[in-house]
Every structure is written in C-alpha cells, then in structure tokens.
Amino acid sequence: MIVGIIGQGYVGLTITTFAAEFFEVIGFDNNQRIVDQLNSGISHIEGVQSSVLQKWIKAGRYKATTSGSDIADVDLVVIAVPTPLSKDRQPDLTYIDAACKTIGENIKKPVLVINESTSFPGTLRNYIKPAVERYSKVPIENLYAISPERVDPGRTDYNQKNTPRLYAGLTAEASEKTRDFYSRFCDKLLEVSSPEVAEAAKLFENTFRQVNIALVNEFAQITNALGISVYETLDAANTKPYGFMKFTPSAGVGGHCIPVDPTYLAAIAEQHGAPATFIRRANDVNLEMSKYVVDRVEADNGGTVEGKSVLVVGVAYKPNVADVRETAAELVIKHLRQRGAVVSWHDDVVGTWHGESSAPLFGADIAIVVTKHDSVKDEEVIASAPYVFDTTGSLKDARGL
Ligand SMILES: NC(=O)c1ccc[n+]([C@@H]2O[C@H](COP(=O)([O-])OP(=O)(O)OC[C@H]3O[C@@H](n4cnc5c(N)ncnc54)[C@H](O)[C@@H]3O)[C@@H](O)[C@H]2O)c1
C-alpha cells in the first residue's frame, strides 16, 4: 500500500515516520525548502529524528515532494495541513481546500481520505468530501474518515503508539479501512459514531485546557491582589485526591492548538445559535495576560518601562520546541514596545524570529521569562538583569505571577 501524506509539518511528518515502517510513504508539502531538506534526510521537527528519516529514505520507503502528480498512485491519503484563524479570527480552511485540490486533481483511483487537521464538526462531511469531488476530473467514489491528531510536540511519555486514537468514517467501509491503517502503529483505537463526534471531541479537549488555563490565569491575578502565592495555593488545592486538576498560570497560551481550536468550536456553536461565552471569555483572559505581565513589571519598576532595556527570555510557545506560532511572547513584546521599552529577546532554540536574532542572556535592565527551555540555566537567567520577572513559576529568586 502506498500512503500519501499532505503536509509534512509537526503532524504530517510524525505520522510519516510511523507509517513508513509498514507502507511506502509519499510526503507532499508545498514548501520546496522543507521538501529539499526532508529528501536530504534532515528533519525540521523536534521529536522526529533525522536518523529515522534517513533510514526510510535509504529503504526506499519515503520521499517528499512538491509535485501533486507524485500522489497519483497512492491508496490512502492523510491531510495534515494547517487550520489557522483568519485575520478577523475566523476558521480559515484555505489550506484544507488546497489539500483537497491536490487530492482531487491528482488521484486516479478511489482512495481513503483521512483528515488529521483539526477543524469544526462537519468539516469532513460538508467541506472535504465536496471539495475533493469538485476538484476531481473523473467521477471516483473515494472513502472519507477523520482521525484527529493528538500529538504533543516535545513530549516523550505519550506518542503515536500509546496515545489512544479516535476515528470515524463517513461509511462503515471507511471506518474499517481507517482502523486497519492506524492499528499498525497505534495501540488503542476508539471508533466513535460519526466524524462529527471525533471532530468535536478534539476541539473540546483543547477547549477544556484553554478554559482551565484562563481560570488559573485569572486566579493568579486574584491571589496577587490578596498578597498570597498562586503556586503555594495551587499546590495546596492539588493535595485533594479527586475532583481537581492542576493548571499553572503563564503569560498566555501559544502554539497551534489552544489559542486556535476553541475559536473553531465557538464559531460553529454561534453559527448554530448555541452559546460559546466561556470559550470567548477564556480566550480574552489568556490574551490579556501579556498586558497584565507588563503592568506588573511596570508597577515594580517605578511605574514605567520607558527607555529601559528589557530582555524577553524564551519566545517559543512552550519549553524545548522552536515553535513560535501564537506565542504569548509576541504580545508581551508588543506591549513593552508600545510603552517605550527597548526590547530584545533570548531564545537559542528559536534562533531567529521576525528577522531578529536571539540576544545574549545578560546586560538588560529587566528580564521577563516567558518560556524556559531546559537548556537555559536558572542562575544565568537570574544574573541576566537586576530585576527578573518569571511567568513560568520555575525560578526561585525572581518576581513572578
Ligand atoms: N502541532 C501540533 O501539536 C498539533 C497537534 C494536533 C493537531 N494539530 C493539527 O494538525 C494540523 C497540522 O498542524 P501542524 O502543527 O502539523 O502544522 P505545520 O505548520 O507544522 O505543518 C503543516 C505543513 O503543511 C504544509 N502545507 C501548507 N499548505 C499545504 C498544502 N496546500 N499542501 C501541502 N502542504 C501544505 C506546510 O508547508 C507545513 O509544512 C492542524 O490542523 C493542527 O491544528 C497540530
């Protein structure tokens, strides 16, 4: 069986390396630089080892391509392209549409199309299937299924193999074939009654996190106003053996999932006349944390950061990854610059970002820690400025949330 995977990013490349153990895999990506890099055996994704990629290339089991015609003979195709928000923060399915175009225009025999990109309930049935059929020049009856990806980049305890996978096909045959595919490399598969349930479950998982993070971010503001430690209070609450799950405060949420997926759920809810008030408010609370952080820093520094050199430590959205999508650091930097601070940032995992390079970890008036990678030493952060504000709760001798 030949498998085509559309999108060779975090999700697509991860699934590629697992699938290549059993199938020949064609990785289609429209970014030539990524494709060239992958074909030379270099992974651009943390968690996907270059050596594994090289093994599959050498065995003739993997090749990356920008050419749609290379997927003409696949038997199964997985969609793993971005599903971001548009400028007005609405679901943006243009990448999905482009992936459907690639499939529709190039597939010459019926295939199983599995969507792994996160989107709102109804995307497979009402959007992907009609789009593939619209672009197809020959009337072929493809099968369609959804299996939302739950990968957490950088995580080592849970991976493709031991993370239970939800799936559902539009037909029983699609479900069965989807199960056959994933059962090769996933220990636990759970079929749900419709693609819409699988799509909604994925959105709810991330909405649950978004709302709880917002709650703890609001709680951090309450504990600060009360003059008590948010961390000590959370640790105390966490001694309850049931009915409590600890989340920790931060400068906001980042990455592709938590700041984005709940908005997909809110959008489809409102389209159907259902309320999404928690989701909308949680999103606002998380976005406002960056301003709160800068307010706190100003309050500790004579009421202003104007003219002061401020080093933002860690601009990736979470530790030990280079991913800066929707990072809270972006808003922290924006507020600092609007208030006249001279801002640089240090993050050697990210390296360069927005045309700027990672600055040395010393010599600032103020340091604000947004993300702390394991490679960054606590003592060096503390020594980087006379005043350090830590939003991660990991530095003993710093001011913090
Ligand atoms: N990153 C995660 O942790 C994660 C986890 C679960 C689900 N998801 C979801 O999976 C989907 C993909 O996310 P990702 O993190 O892998 O994104 P990514 O940005 O890492 O990778 C997407 C890849 O798709 C390519 N691409 C864009 N348009 C294309 C097109 N028309 N044809 C072919 N390739 C195209 C890009 O060049 C890129 O390499 C999203 O819907 C996301 O919400 C992501």
Image: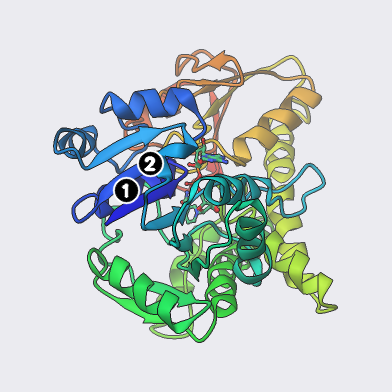
Asked whether residue 394 is in view, the answer is no
Q: Amino acid at mark 2?
A: Gly
Secondary structure state at the residue bearing disc 2: strand
User: Would residue 393 be seen by someone viewing this image from the given angle?
Assistant: yes
Percent x, y of residue 311: 57, 22
Q: Is residue 129 above or below residue 59?
A: below
Q: Which mark is residue 27?
A: 2
Q: Residues within 10 Å of mark 1 (few under 14, many from 20)?
A: many
**x, y (%) of residue 130?**
66, 63
Is the residue marked 2 within 8 Å of ligand 1, measured from its CB? Answer: no
Residue beneath disc 1: 16
Image location (x, y in percent) of residue 84: 65, 48
Going by the image, does 22 lie left or right of 247? left
Q: Residue at x 67, y 41 (%)?
A: 293
Other residues around mark 2 within 10 Å, as few (<14) / some (14–19) / many (≥20): many
Which residue is located at x 52 percent, y 41 percent?
A: 317
